[in-house]
Amino acid sequence: MTRDELNAHRLVKEAKETELRSFTRRHFLKESAMGLGAIAMGSLLGSCNFGAKTNNPVLYDPAHPLLPKSPPYFGKAKSVIYLHMAGAPSQLELFDYKPELMKMDGQDCPPSLLAGKKFAFITGVPKMLGAQAQFAQHGQSRAWVSDNMPHFSTMVDEVSFLKAVSTDQFNHAPAQLLIHTGSARLGRPSIGSWATYGLGTENQNLPGYVVLTSGGSFPDAGKSIWGSGFLPSVYQGVQCRSEGDPVLFIKDPHGMSRDLRKASIDAINASNELEYANYNDPEILSRISQYEMAYRMQISAPEVMNINDEPAYIHEMYGTQPGKSSFANNVLLARKLVEKGVRFVQLFDWGWDAHGDGPNNSLNIGLKNKCRSTDKPITALLLDLKQRGLLDETLVVWGGEFGRTPMMENRNGIQNPYNGRDHHTEAFTMWMAGGGIKKGFTHGETDEIGYSALSGKVDPFDIQATILNQLGFNHEQFTYPFQGRPFRLTDVSGKVIQDIVA
Amino acid sequence: MIPGMKIFRSKKLIVILVILGVVVMGAFLMPSSDKVDFNTQIKPILNKKCISCHGGVKKQGGFSVLFHEEALAATKSGKPAIIPGDPDGSEMIKRLLSKDPELRMPYKHESLNEEEIDLFKRWIKQGAKWGDHWAYLPVKEVEIPDVSDDWVKNDIDKFIYAKLEEKKMKPSAEADKATLLRRLSLDLIGLAPSDQVMRRYLNSKDNDKAYETLVDSLMASPRFGEKWASMWLDVARYADTKGYESDGGREVWKYRDWVIKAFNDDKPYNQFITDQIAGDFYVNPTDEQYIATAFHRNTMTNDEGGTNNEEFRVSAVLDRVNTTWEGLLSTTFACVQCHSHPYDPFKHDEFYKFMAYFNNTRDEDLQSEYPLLRQYDDSLQRKLSGLTSWLKQNAGQEKAAEVYKFLKTGQPSINSTTTDSLKNAVIGNNNIALFFKNNAQARIPAVDLKGVKQMIYRYSSNVPGGNMQLRMDNPNGPLIASWKVPSGDKYQNLEVEIKPQTGIHDVYLVYQNPGIKNKDQFTVYFDWFYFSDSFPGKAKPGYAENKAAFWTLLNSNPSSIPVMVENPANRQRKSYVFERGAWISKGKEVQVGVPKTLAYAMPKNAPKNRMGLAMWLTDSRNPLLSRTMVNRLWEQLFGTGIVETLEDMGTQGMSPTHKELLDHLSWQFMHQYKWSVKTLLKEMVMSAAYRQDSRLSEAVKEKDLFNHYYARGPRTRLSAEQLRDQHLMASGVLSTKMYGHGVMPWQPEGIWNSPYNGAKWENSKGEDQYRRAIYTYWKRSAPYPSMIAFDGAQRVVCSPRRIRTNTPLQALVTLNDEAYIEMARHFAKRMELEGGKDIGQKISKGYQWVMYKPIAAPKLRILDKLYLQAFNDYKKNPAKMGEILGAEDKDKNPEKAALVIVANAMLNLDEVVTKN
């Protein structure tokens, strides 16, 4: 190094050390502000009332936006794997066993179920449709699971079922947005963004919030479903891919060796150190760090995203095939990512929209195929997490954006060619496992045909409140100021589902 | 952001607290009689400690401190809580001091400190005067600080200098010419200037004059409008798709082009706003005026099956309200949708009065996006002109205007989706169009039949032999038309004569076709209905050919763009307050109006429609429109707004750092510059404050790390657009082609993966690969990834401010994105060809193209070293050479390959991605 470079290098090193020292201290101050201030604040604040800015600690530090932070309360879950079956799986063919509905199979839908209701496609008087699957009880908890999920049925003693989830959105995109961002409209941060904003990430070489998609299409709501909304964009979900580059632009250009990339980043940073010596702008320090991190991420991301080296029994267990894009591969990746300290992993599997307007959208063909491609990997995930001792600290959530009608769909008043069900908002099933959730438990119950909730009704806000609770946040106190008020994920609603918390 | 700052601040805070403590103690010993200022001393405490229970959302005990009259009014107890002039008799003070925890306020919270209570006492003693928030008071002419220092170049500097003096700081000297050239150029046109402009400036002797010439030539460049339009398109949430689930394409790019032209033509800002809010209200609007109104057609449209059109129409209208307030008026109005504003003086029903201005446009969340402005090609346009002048002569101005409007906008027609009382009919997929089976009927509610002689309708039918009837009042009511429905495989327009009637009636469509056996088969599909007088001038010469021209025009399929068109007088929607903001719970009916606090700016003669709204917005008494734009432009140049929260100048926004300067510029903007954006920008960039060197001294680092007081020049990372444009220009491939459809430059596979929608990203060809960022096709649900990485706005709703981040994902874009690698290749090629003999010269030349100044020796050595390493690497691995140079390069050698590596590094240097 020349004298100029040495001098610049020393300056940058000193500056970084000072920064780290003061950050640690500031961090501590903020933490305590969050811990105490927030507790004091939360109870008095509704969504729209909040104290002056000084009372509302913002955890965002532009210089270190992703440093790990502890939540204000003790959280049993350190990370979350959220498995979203986009298109909305039918609860009536999977978990919600309704012998009465079977008896009504083929009959006209009673007018009482139609009066004043609106459906996405059903018009006029549809026919009732009994379950297109066989049900049996499983495990010590005697939970009902259909023969569509033969593997998963062995895991029922690990999970808590939510049988009476309801929503107020009967279209895919708004319903997906509601469940992931707390609003049916675009523009709010997703739950994963909230989690990384609140917790940072434990692995600085990987994104804190990773999204994996399968099924040949993005979820209906598009990328905004993992967007950061009004939170700084650094908290948006990073889409990783099991085919092609695991993270966009992570690969060096063709024809550039790793050594050259290293040399080139070293050159950029050496030059930037000189720039810092000249301009003294702390933003330059931050840029130097980001380039270093980018380089490290280039190594870690492909490493963690590579499943080739997993042992054969793992591939057998998950049903994975390296190099292909599949839900199974994504599930295995989710486990690997969580193992490496990623906070929030979201999987979207597209193609569950069994209307009956085509074979792939039918309960007897399409749905069965979807079950076949997900049953084994999901079961493997729970087993694998358990055997690694990770299930206790990893919350696994499974569900769709709404449920499906006990009636057979008749689009524009005409019977659909295959057996299918329309979108249904009033009752559907989700489940959670691990991360401090009760084992072998069922919360909520629907009526005898699975149309509406009888007890234990929960909505997307309750789900969100519960997830945040498991991560160590009180959803009513966890806010970010925007448009002149503190926003929270759960807006003005949400209750932790205490019944399923272990 | 840097460490140390917050701690420094809190140290300062401690000092302040100590001083305050002394002051407070003094106050207790000797009651102060100093005048208490509501805005700076009382309102902040109210907002912080009281208003969450006693404000716009809750009024505990019937007491609210949001409005003056509320604060002084009787509470639930029957007595007012505040009695002006009598602090000891005021319940409020008693409650603040009470020892009983059930009575003491703030309830269940820490009590106010003695200083705060003392402030309240003095304030009540002095009459409990209210003060309006500065941003809601009109802009007044400001006295310019009396500063005489050589540093000062114009009035802006006097404000800046005075504030710096107050803060015990000194401004910086002017930056060097190269830095200024680059800063100014990136700011004004978003990329490098032409060689000629650059050379003229760098070679000039008279710095001041040359600088001004530079400013003028940059402002005259057509690139100017492209730069400033990028800023506006965030506010306008412009995108090339409709949003929501299917997020299909939308042809609205002519609006983007309109914005570019408006900035280039320096359209006065009041005109710019009027055209966009109410362009359709002009008498015989021009195409340009219609296109401007697409500003508020950039709202999303939901095409998903089963959605309620009215729900999403309302949603679009709400978005228009919020965008108008947030983007044009720096006010967060969205919370008033559900309840009165918690902090600012806006009441719940005022949101809906304001919403009523936007509630009467023809758009109804249709897949077709009606109403559309139809833009005919030249020959059809001539036909239209001929027809219009014939109509003027033979049927009068009014008829001519009516026909013209129908042919240009298809309005005022009735969308088939609004029919009801359906029998054997559905609104297909619940929201697309009206479908008939055999023996069908549908009601078109409340049609004004006065003067109606015909109905033109757009439909398609795949079965011949159908009979259609129109009946009045009920499905068996008087027959007013009857005809055979021709079949065909496409949508077509037809007319049918109607027996003359008077008054407003429900009209029933009744359909029957004896040839149809399958009762479930859909046979007729309707798009819209248009009731009107018959084509005028029947007896006049030229009738036949002009009627034919009318039909040719109507049946043509010209290019079109969604625009605003108002409902006709006889089809006005009513507006209601929505209880708790839910569109389905309609409360009391409301009429158009602006919030009372700001009603003073409404001109007396303003009509009660969108044109009236535009008049209020652009009235020089409107306190927010000019301040907001001045603040927005300032932020673009200086990196931070004078009010940092561009989206909120209300009491919860940040306070202005230089309120007088903001007001001075806002006043000048309206009164001196006549709303000329270019004049305003010129004033800003001519200031010494703007021209300062951006080096940060240790002294200033301690005092003003974030440059709130401008003791140095701006230094910020380039915007997503600036970055792409600059890099393309440096690579020598930038296309200067303007306007037109969005283009699709290279992006990785798999970014678009839309359900239900075969939309594909197809890489543009030729120069369209290298257009400026503003022309990149913008899909809301999957925007261009490299622009999003650099904080580009998603453009789903109004984004009044981009918050800059600094992340490793950004580094990955400029290091590895194939689009950026290709730029590096071209950049390297340019250096290779035009740079000079040896590698040092080539690198220096390349650096100079981007930075306009020679590269510093140590930096050159670093890049030189990198070159050498790359050269050796490629010499050893010649196979890799081909990959880095790309397939197009036929004559490969390690020198060229190594230069690509260097070019890539150069395009990642801090100074290159930064505006300095």
Image (tube, rainbow, N blue to C red):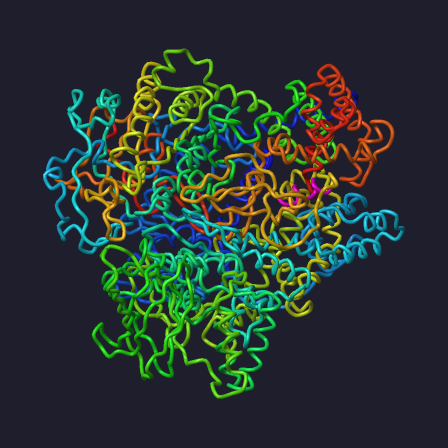
Residue shown at 70%/63% (left/top)?
B144
Magenta run includes residue B432: no
Secondary structure, magenta segment, majority class: helix
Magenta-tinted stretch: B721-729
The verdict on residue B722 being magenta is yes
Residue B546 at x, y percent in the picture: 53, 78
Question: Does residue A357 appear to the left or right of A246 in the view shown?
Answer: left
Q: Foreground: B456 or B12?
A: B456
Query: Horizontal placement of B604 versus B261: left or right?
Result: left
Residue A149: x percent and y percent? 25, 26
User: Camera-side residue: A301 or A214?
Assistant: A214
Q: Residue at x 69, y 69 (%)?
A: B672
In the rendered image, residue B244, in percent from the top left (x then y), is placed at 42, 48
Left or right side of B521 for A36? right
- Image quarter where the C terminus of chain B lies is top right
Q: Is residue A93 visible?
A: yes
Residue A361: name its quadrant.
Answer: top left
Q: Does B691 appear above or below B885?
A: below
Left of B885 or right of it: where is B666?
left
Quarter holding the N terminus of chain B is top right
- Give x and y (percent) for residue A157: 22, 22
Tell which residue pokes out farthest to the bottom in this image: B539
